[in-house]
Image (tube, rainbow, N blue to C red):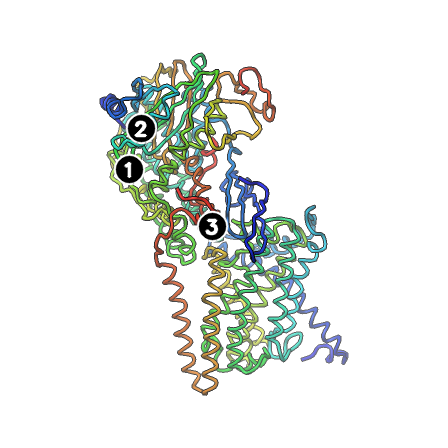
Amino acid sequence: MSAASEVPAIAALVRERLPEVPFTASETKTYADLRVAPARLLELMTGLRDDPDLAFDLLRNVVALDMEEEGLAARYQLYSFRHSHALQVSVAAPLAAPVLPTLTGLWPTADWHEREAAEMVGLVFSGHPDPRNLLLEEDLRIHPLRKAHPLQQAEILQGIEDGPPGVDR
Amino acid sequence: MAIWPEERTAAAGDLDTVDMTVNVGPQHPATHGVFRMVLTVDGERVVGCEPYIGYLHRGLEKLTENADYRQAMGWWDRTDYLAGMCCEGAYVMAVERLAGIEAPERAEYIRALMMELSRINSHFMFLGAFGADVGSFGTSFTYAWRERERIYDLFEEVAGDRMFPTYFRIGGVTMDLPANFERRCREVLASIRQGLEDLDGLLTGNEVFVERCRGLTPVTPEWAIARGVTGPMLRATGLAWDIRKAEPYGVYPKLDFDIPTGRQGDVFDRFHVRLAECYQSARMVEQCLEAMPGGRVLAPKLPKTLRINEGELYFPTEGTKGEYGVYLMARGGTQPYRAKLRSPSFCNLSALRELVVGTYVADAIVILGSLDIVLGEVDK
Amino acid sequence: MTFGEAFFGMSWLDAIIRIVIVVLLMTVVVVYLTYGERKVIARFQMRLGPTRTGPAGLLQGVADALKLLCKEDVRPRNADRWVFEFAPYLTFIPVFLVLAALPFARDWGVRNLALGMFFVFAVLGLNIVGVLMAGLGSGNKYALLGGVRAAAQMISYEIPLVVALLAVAMLAGTLDLNAIAAMQESRPFVLVQPLAFVIFLTAVLSELHRAPFDIPVAESEIVGGYFVEYSGIRWSMFQLAEYAALWAFSIFGAVVFLGGWQFPFGDDWGWWWQLILTLVKSLLLILLIFWVRATLPRLRMDQLMSFCWKALIEVSFALLLVNGLFLYFGWSEIILAVVNWAGAAAFLGAIYLRAIRKPAVENLVGAYKHAGVSPP
């Protein structure tokens, strides 16, 4: 676990190695967090993976978030085996057009993570090779992890294309 | 991926053949739960594989987001239901880190002990079920089951429940260990070691078993990392990476253990790494027993209702199948705003298609077994 | 001894009585073989096996048989009706025909055939037809895979089986099973031809679909294989055929290799001792087969076939050649036995060494070439 004192260090290192990508650095309880605009996400991620001093070769996790009034968001947790450092990249996606670039080209493991994020929250990953539902039924067009989705009605909704307001695609 | 047979253009002089699709699961003895894969086979060769998951999706994340931090713990037991304590531990430690609560040292030792026993339990399940996948008629299964029963009995004595103990608490553990725990635990450990030797003798030295597993789908560490494959499967490729050492949590920095690794990441190495990890876990349990300090098991002055202000974290732990990470986001209130499980089985399973394509039907079952998935964890 | 002639002087009645005795005996034996298998394997697996039905669970087999008789006979809609319904009979009849040729004691059998060994092979070969019919007629892909696997496996393993037995028949100079048994007064053939015995046992495991060659009925892969769609009485016919074949092959092996009713003291102590000898020897072989099942995992289809075509057939033909040379030059049987023991040791040793050898990593991640998928 990176101690709190290291957090600026890794952000500074990223800033030094990838000066052309703008991001704002903060820290979570465990790792540093880089906030980047959706348009620059792919660029940042490619840099993070390919730069020899950063070398984030493991995409640990993709978290899709519904931030209600702030729209949708995603968190990517990265880890580097070569340097044993870790990082979180966060990106916001407006609810009107929640489109993010797919990372399947960088890390094949992003495939299932993104499929799950897409069906659960409603993010759209442009260029994803196989954008079908993964955990939910194939014809189900609801996004259960949206905050507007009611907890109790999941069973009733199964197989119905038009969900209640705010949860359909 | 084709679900229906595709016509193949036959070369001159060849017989004209049509690929057949075979649906394996969700009710199938070798899918370890409700996993389904559609194999496209050309005779005995697998030319296509399409995994389907979600049959056990219970909405863990949604439920957690709608429950109190403490109430939600019970759901996390049921993700990797073979090692409930490990899942509880990951969730509880993540919440503690988020809320800034410190558990007493004795509680941390008890947690590590229970988590390692859980790991042994889960690996025993693998060893038994894998033997059955390779085709041993249940003998490995019953060998493994004997030791699992003893571990479960111990859990029952400590926590009152076998599979889903809900024994950990935010800030410690529910109650102290029973008075005769150390003696009982050492008995169980001796039995575990005997059971491991029995299984080792039954499977590792078995010519047919070796013939089936050696050299089957060897993978490189780079390949595994790109696909998010972690845990024993990654260590089988020769990369000694274990979160208990790489990003240690709890009392693991104080425990002395080795990371067993394989050489070529094939099915046999995956099996052998898990077998070796059981011995390491048994070592850790012994160290915990010896080093266990006295004192409280639950932190004093815990708030009556746990409210956490703004904050988020991703907390990785070494689950039994790989990196078991918990992402939590708090935005005030008594419920997590977002909870996300980084499930190792989920990521390992996503590599299945590439592993299976090109092998034989019988190998597909063995490879699936060697991934050691738990559907509760895959489907959340 | 002839029952019919003794009672009424009618030879056809004699034949009928013998057949009835054998069929009844068979049914009872099969019921108790399943019980025995469950008990034996349970012990290997630290369990108790059946204990509830009758004393020590002895009536479990009867209860199972009754339950199977009462169950609904389901035929899937996709199934080819006649093929599906006749397949159980065609697996079941040949096994019972084989029993007609097996000598339980001197002159105790349905018929003592001059070409007994030949008859056993010829009739057991018919078994494949039923299995293949079950696989093709069920309209189920698991069954189809199982049926095709079974056909490939049984046809292949018949060759080493026949050749290994031919080697013994050469030494005996006859195909008459009674004569072969009678010849083993001083030593059973297993002492002279251990290699033939090993090949015989391997091939028999395969012919019977027992572990480690239970590939056509692999529970964890194809969920039971060719009889996956059968239920009730038809399923129990497959079961009956399987255990009847197990017993038939064991008696056959006991007669050819272990001295049958003859060794030791078969002629001196009378027919009751001969019966006991046959039964005990066949049960020992069955126990060995159960033991193997409780211990060994399953081979893969290609490994199974290459083991047959690349190892067993060659070794069995070499055995035939060596036996021929010995007979031609008239060398002593002791030398033949020594050569054979060495051969058996070398064969088993080679299998062991091959398995524990570590293969080089040829290609990482599956066989991509075949699937047309490019490696990462």
Q: Secondary structure at mark 1?
A: helix
Say few, some or many: other residues with alpha carbon within 10 Å of mark 3 (under 14 / 14 to 19 / 20 or more).
Answer: few
Q: Who's the residue at 62% across and 63% down the image?
A: C127
Q: Identify residue for label 2.
A: A47
Who is closer to the viewer here, C280 or B260? Answer: B260
The answer to whether residue B93 is visible is: no
Q: What amino acid is found at the position of numbered circle 3 in the picture? A: His
Task: From the top left corner, tell me how far across and down residue C363 is, in percent.
Answer: 38, 50
Q: Secondary structure at mark 3?
A: helix
Task: From the top left corner, tell me how far across and down residue A69 is, in percent.
Answer: 44, 12
Mark number displayed over residue C370: 3
Mark number displayed over residue C184: none
Say few, some or many: other residues with alpha carbon within 10 Å of mark 2 (under 14 / 14 to 19 / 20 or more).
Answer: some
Task: From the top left corner, tell me how far across and down residue A72 is, in percent.
Answer: 44, 18
Q: Is residue B80 above or below residue C61?
A: above
Q: What amino acid is found at the position of numbered circle 1 in the picture? A: Leu
Residue C25, by quadrant, is bottom right
- Contact, CB < 8 Å: mark 2 with mark 1? no
Mark number displayed over residue B289: 1
Distance between mark 2 and mark 3 Cα atoms: 35 Å
The answer to whether residue B179 is visible is: yes
Say few, some or many: other residues with alpha carbon within 10 Å of mark 1 (under 14 / 14 to 19 / 20 or more).
Answer: some
Q: Residue furthest bottom?
A: C330
Task: From the top left corner, tell me how far across and down residue C309 is, in percent.
Answer: 49, 65
